[in-house]
Amino acid sequence: MNLKRLYSKALGIAFLACILPVGLAAQATDTDKKIADLEKQLEAVRAQIEALKTPAPAPAPAAVAVVTPAAAPAANPMSGITSVLGGVNLTGLVDAYYGYNANHPSLANGATNTEPFTFTNNQFSLNLVEIQLDKPVDKTSPLGFRVALGFGQAMNAVNNAGNSPNSPDVASGLAGAAQYLKEGYLSYMIPFGKGIQLDGGKFVTPAGAEVIETNQNWNYSRSLLFSYAIPYYHMGLRAKYTFSDKLSVTALATNGWNNVVATNTGKTGGLSVAWNATKKLSITETYLGGPRDYYGVGNNGPWNNLTDTVIAYSATPKLSLQANLDYNRIEEFGASKRPADYAGIAGYVKYAVSPVVAVAARYEYLNDHDGFATPISQFGIAKGQHMNEFTGTVERKIAGHLVSRLEYRHDSSNQPFFTRGNSIGAVKGQSTVDAGLVFVLEPSETK
């Protein structure tokens, strides 16, 4: 109702209320009743007027949801470097340890046999310092490379393997120049199907369950099979085709085993098939075959065949199992020129006690009955050798980049193979303890 109309109605009613008692005195009873009714109406009108004068309360503001901004993800310490390098990944590690050998061998007398990467006794040592630049390839960016430089006992063991004084690597000076090069190759993605990655240069072998870098293995020391049964690296070409997330195949043609300069007129070829059978089970089968100049004297050596099998099984999120089997045969060996072979098996188990603590164990057996694999046997000092090795390792992650490992290892043989003190003779057993500390820097780490 309009406010002006309400005021007019109220005035009219008030006027009638004033004149009715004078003009209609004779009808007192009816008039009083009408006046009472009019007063009630007047009160109602007044109430309406007051209601119109009083502004309606403002509606309560709608509740505003308070949104707490999500915490920003931790900054990646490598992202700035990767950006500057134009997509090239920079990784590295520093690996140092303290080694103890119960036999107390002298460095001049062979040090710790069976552990070429951690051979020192009763002293602090540098296992490996590594810096790697890696430009991965795909169909949108088909050209890439990898350069991995290393320094320390591990690199000495890798690059001195099989390099006799007569080896072309030594004679040409390449052994010294390449001493600190772990890997160096160019990559190209051939646009065929899902893409064939072609690598040319020096690269690590596809064989074996272990690798050169300690932090990527379950134990701190390397196995007998890694040290004696397979090569460390190759020089040549390799091509990899990934059919799916379950199957990939790598083919390679190289100069041989552990040599940059070829010692054979022929080449060593190989094939490695990686099959992820299930989410828990994976199998990798590798074959390497070709003439092998075992003594590094420049002659085209006899044909050599190696088969390597790695089986990995994740039983539970905390429990992992692994097995490695190797068999190698050379058609002519030693002065007799007869065939020789060796075979070995290694079993691994790892259990994650907590997110930062894990325990691992390794047992292996190497049957080198012809004296072909082990370095002392090859010169006829000991033959018919059967070796066993057990290792127990405790790992603790101290921080995002820092890992510590404490390890006990015992090696034994049916032949006197292990040095003791300064003596010329050898013994049949060896016990060692290693305490290692590894600092790792990877692009995926954020703290």
Image: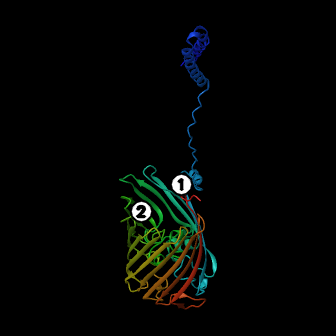
From the viewer's side, name the closer residue of 363 and 117. 363
In the displayed structure, would residue 216 be above or below residue 379?
A: above
Q: Amino acid at mark 2?
A: Arg
Evaluate whether residue 96 shows in this view: yes
Residue 187, x across and y down, in percent: 46, 57
From the viewer's side, name the closer residue of 316 and 51. 51
Total count of labels: 2
Q: Amino acid at mark 1?
A: Val
> For the residue carrying disc 1, how many other residues have a C-alpha within 10 Å: few (<14), some (14-19), or many (20+)?
some
Residue drawn at x 45%, y 77% is: 225
Residue drawn at x 39%, y 73% is: 308
In-image side of 338 versus 66 (left or right): left
Residue 232, x across and y down, in percent: 48, 71
Badge number at residue 173: none
Residue drawn at x 56%, y 43% is: 65
Label 1: which residue? 88
Q: Quadrant of residue 336?
A: bottom left
Evaluate whether residue 269 shows in this view: no
> Alpha carbon of mark 1 to alpha carbon of mark 2: how far?
21 Å
Type of colouring: rainbow
In the displayed structure, would residue 412 be above or below residue 302?
A: below
Label 1's element? loop
Residue 125, x across and y down, in percent: 62, 75
In-image side of 209 versus 35 (left or right): left
Position of the C terminus, as image quadrant, is bottom right
For marks 1 and 2, the one nearer the N-term is 1
Between tags 1 and 2, which lies in front? 1
In the displayed structure, would residue 3 be above or below residue 60?
A: above
Label 2: which residue? 238
